[in-house]
Amino acid sequence: QVQLVESGGGLVQPGGSLRLSCAASGIIFSMYTMAWYRQGPGLQRQLVATISSGGFINYADSGKGRFTISRDNAKNTVFLQMNSLKPEDTAVYYCNAFYFSKNYWGQGTQVTVSS
């Protein structure tokens, strides 16, 4: 059974930082491209960042220069370091794993940026 379990969300003030983690099980983690998506209130789910099995990284414009995606294949975990957070970063953040036709989602972790 495939599981993606996100953690690290919470309430943070504008300008603050959070580090999200996503622990995967039930997949050969090193083969998968991992991604973070987010869905803000009333908005569609949007891509935040991806990291391929070979370590190639891509960021959406919303997070460039502020967010850093990384992965630890030994721990089957992908991370999202978020700095200089803004109120508009408030969203549920989802972990995604995909490999050809296989596509899996976590249940999400809430990030709220507010003073």
Image (spheres, grey):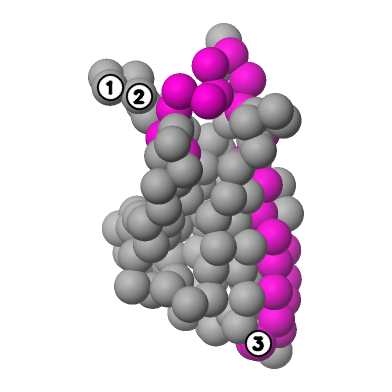
Give the percent coordinates (x, y) of residue 112: 62, 71
Asked where in the image residue 64 lies, by quadrant, the reply is bottom left
Q: Amino acid at mark 3?
A: Gly
Identify the secondary structure beneath mark 1: loop
Asked where in the image residue 82 lies, by quadrant, the reply is bottom right
109 relative to 11 in the view: left or right: left
3 relative to 103 in the view: left or right: right
Look at the image and say whether residue 25 sits in the magenta stretch: yes
- Mark 1, residue position: 100
- Mark 3, residue position: 15
Q: Amino acid at mark 1?
A: Phe
Identify the secondary structure beneath mark 2: strand
- Mark 2, residue position: 99
Q: Is residue 103 above or below residue 54?
A: above
In the displayed orientation, state which residue is furthest to the left.
101
Q: How far is the residue under mark 1 from the one under mark 2?
A: 4 Å
Label 1, residues with CA under 10 Å away: few <14, some 14-19, many ≥20: few
Seen from the viewer's position, the closer of residues 11 and 41 is: 11
Range drawn in magenta: 9-34
Seen from the viewer's position, the closer of residues 77 and 44 is: 77
